[in-house]
């Protein structure tokens, strides 16, 4: 076989996660950067999910998205104001606020450009939950990173660039996948550092991994 040419397909492939809590989660399964993103969306009863056509449904809200390569999130809390309940006792009354809660269908269109300044539109619909997530539920990850380990080889120092930018008070999460080449037990010292080298914390983790011999070359984790 003679490869005469090869080029990277830099088109983004946007996926909207279904069933999230308090936010809309977008993944980019492609290899292109999403620039100048703007999303127009609305909410409806989840029972309308199957019949809803996002190409014709009227939207009510709009929000700008920061450029992203791997994924991003759109918080939805502000679009559901708390419910006010007034309790009356005799001549006195007191008003309480109860956080909004329930399941909704979110729909709309994502408009964005790529590095080639080509305009794109992606219509979507997804189900979201608003309110307090069940106790112990893992937050949705906006990015996935990977590390390959050589079983029986020490020391090993693996560094993974984490591309996340947070403002004060913001919260985000990502997933770190660890892939050994063979079955084994690993004692890991995980640490997180800021771009200026500040240590943000350490965690000791013990991992026992089983890698079937027949599957060892089937999967490969890649990271930058």
Image (cartoon, rainbow, N blue to C red):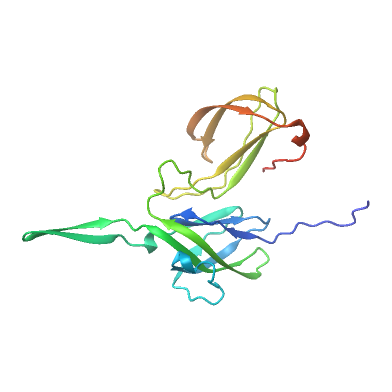
Along the viewing direction, whichever of 94 and 193 lies nearer the viewer: 94
Q: Is residue 43 above or below residue 32?
A: below
Residue drawn where x is 51% and y is 39% of the image: 194
In the rendered structure, the answer to whether residue 161 lies left or right of residue 60 reads right
Residue drawn where x is 25% and y is 57% of the image: 97
In the rendered image, residue 129, in percent from the top left (x then y), is placed at: 44, 56
Q: Is residue 172 above or below residue 54?
A: above
Instruction: Identify the image quadrant of residue 98.
Output: bottom left
In the rendered image, residue 146, in percent from the top left (x then y), is placed at: 64, 40
Instruction: Identify the image quadrant of residue 209.
Output: top right
In the rendered structure, the answer to whether residue 61 lies left or right of residue 197 reads left
Along the viewing direction, whichever of 221 and 104 lies nearer the viewer: 104
Instruction: Identify the image quadrant of residue 221.
Output: top right
Along the viewing direction, whichever of 208 and 176 lies nearer the viewer: 208
Residue drawn where x is 54% and y is 55% of the image: 72
Q: Is residue 35 above or below residue 201?
A: below
Residue drawn where x is 52% and y is 62% of the image: 126
In the rendered image, residue 158, in percent from the top left (x then y), is placed at: 64, 33
Along the viewing direction, whichever of 171 and 132 lies nearer the viewer: 132
């Amino acid at each position: 076989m003679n490869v005469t040419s090869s080029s990277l397909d830099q088109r983004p492939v946007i996926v909207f996660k279904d069933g999230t809590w308090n936010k809309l989660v977008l993944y980019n399964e492609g290899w292109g950067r999403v620039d100048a993103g703007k999303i127009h969306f609305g909410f409806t009863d989840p029972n309308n999910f199957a019949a809803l056509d996002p190409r014709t449904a009227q939207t009510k809200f709009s929000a700008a998205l920061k450029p992203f390569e791997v994924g991003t999130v759109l918080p939805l809390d502000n679009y559901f104001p708390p419910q006010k309940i007034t309790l009356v006792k005799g001549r006195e009354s007191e008003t309480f606020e109860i956080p909004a809660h329930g399941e909704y269908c979110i729909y709309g269109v994502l408009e964005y450009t790529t590095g080639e300044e080509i305009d794109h539109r992606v219509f979507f619909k997804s189900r979201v939950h608003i309110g307090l997530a069940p106790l112990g539920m893992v937050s949705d990850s906006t990015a996935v990173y990977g590390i390959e380990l050589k079983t029986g080889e020490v020391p090993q120092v693996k560094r993974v660039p984490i591309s996340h930018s947070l403002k004060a008070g913001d919260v985000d999460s990502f997933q770190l996948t660890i892939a050994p080449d063979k079955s084994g037990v690993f004692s890991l010292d995980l640490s997180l550092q800021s771009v200026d080298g500040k240590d943000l914390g350490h965690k000791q983790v013990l991992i026992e991994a089983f890698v079937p011999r027949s599957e060892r070359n089937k999967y490969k984790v890649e990271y930058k």
